[in-house]
Amino acid sequence: MGNRAIVKPEGRNVGVYLHWNGGIDSVTAFLKYCELKGYRSFEDPYGLARFCQVVGNFFGGGLSIGIEVDVDETDEYAEWIDNGIYVVKGWKIVRRIGGYQSREGYELNEMLHEIDIKQPLTERLGDFLDAEETDISDIKVGDIVFVHNYHNGYEKHRVVGIGEDKVVNGRNVKGFPYVDKYGHDPSCNINNYIFEKTRVWKGESK
């Protein structure tokens, strides 16, 4: 017995077998966690490997996760699996084949925290999960924002200015906030600018 599922990338016949936590609440949280980490998409072999890494860390042990090959997206193939087959594009479930289990009742943010605490300390999202997602236009000088560092998640940095009407590395930065991450003059380094919605930390200052 278990709470089984197969999670597979769209367009591929390989899938990740979960013996436990195969309900849609858990699977959605596993996928969302990988998306928040900035991993490559689930269809990419590296993204698929990172999903296995995150889920394996969550379970521990050696029997709760496996790789299924020649996965067939049919009700007949899925009939032995409690939660069926989840087909994923990017980090979103786009369809589900088979399955008869109901929702597990896990709240998304609560489950994200449970996943996070099982990851190695240096790879956790930590405070990022409790920060408020904020539009660029609402970010102010002095705010503490999270900047993705492409290695182990996010770092907190203080917003030290709002871009003027000038071009930095081929892009006009007018109106975009920038942080104090690189250089003696942060306004001159394009890598300091925030161009997409980010999260603002409302807890204790850095």
Image (tube, rainbow, N blue to C red):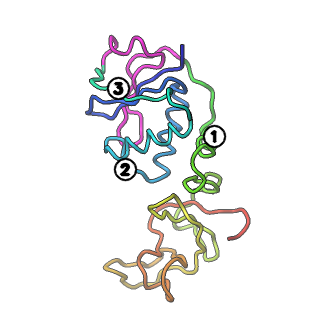
Q: Which residue lies most toward the right here? A: 204
Q: Quadrant of the C terminus?
A: bottom right
Side (left or right) of 28 relative to 112: left
- Residue span colored magenta: 74-101
Badge 2 or badge 3: first in the primary sequence: 2
Disc 2 residue type (three-letter): Arg
* Discs 2, 3 touching: Cβ within 8 Å: no
Residue 83 lies in the magenta stretch: yes
SS for callout 3: strand
Q: Is residue 202 above or below residue 157?
A: above
Badge 2 or badge 1: first in the primary sequence: 2
Q: Quadrant of residue 26?
A: top right
How far separated are the C-alphas under marks 3 and 1?
A: 26 Å
Q: Residue at x 48, y 69 (%)?
A: 194
**Label 2 Cα neighbours within 10 Å, binned few <14 / some 14-19 / many ≥20:** some
Disc 1 residue type (three-letter): Glu
Q: Label 1 belongs to which residue?
A: 114
